[in-house]
Amino acid sequence: MTVVGLLDFGDASIGDPIWDLAVLTAHHADRLKYVLAGYQPDDKLRTRITQSIGAFQILRHLGAANWLCTHGLDPSLDLRAVLHGIEKLIDDSNLTKTRRSGAVELGENGRLA
């Protein structure tokens, strides 16, 4: 008999299915479109996924960074991903505000006023 796979239910829980998509695409966000093509969510769920997956991915990277730190490993890759994810959420928020109001006011430091 040959072992061809292992199942691990250590992290199994009841929760939002977007969490699974965030974990699956955390280091390859560009692959979300392919996952969604196979997953085939309805329009309402697709919108919810695309609007919230960035926040879920940030949480995933924070959790991974915490685990790495507590085990004496380098969390820098995941921490960089957290920063990148936050910057992307801010940029996306600015675009949304620009579309709604026509302009975004920035303070002297280049941040939202």
Image: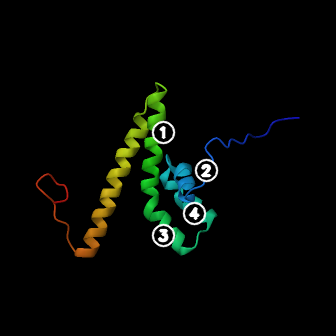
Q: Which residue is mark 3?
A: 47
- The residues bearing labels 2 and 1 have C-alpha atoms spaced at a distance of 17 Å
- The residues bearing labels 2 and 4 have C-alpha atoms spaced at a distance of 22 Å
The residue closer to the viewer here, 82 or 32, is 82
Q: Earlier in the sequence, mark 2 or mark 1?
A: 2
- The residues bearing labels 2 and 3 have C-alpha atoms spaced at a distance of 24 Å
From the viewer's perspective, is residue 44 above or below residue 18? below
Q: Quadrant of the C terminus?
A: bottom left
Q: Which residue is mark 2?
A: 13
Q: Which residue is mark 1?
A: 64
The residue closer to the viewer here, 31 or 2, is 2
Q: Position of residue 89 (x, y in %)?
A: 35, 57
Q: Amino acid at mark 4?
A: Leu
Q: Which residue is mark 4?
A: 36
Labelled disc at residue 75 = none
Q: Quadrant of the N terminus?
A: top right
Q: Position of residue 71 (x, y in %)?
A: 49, 26
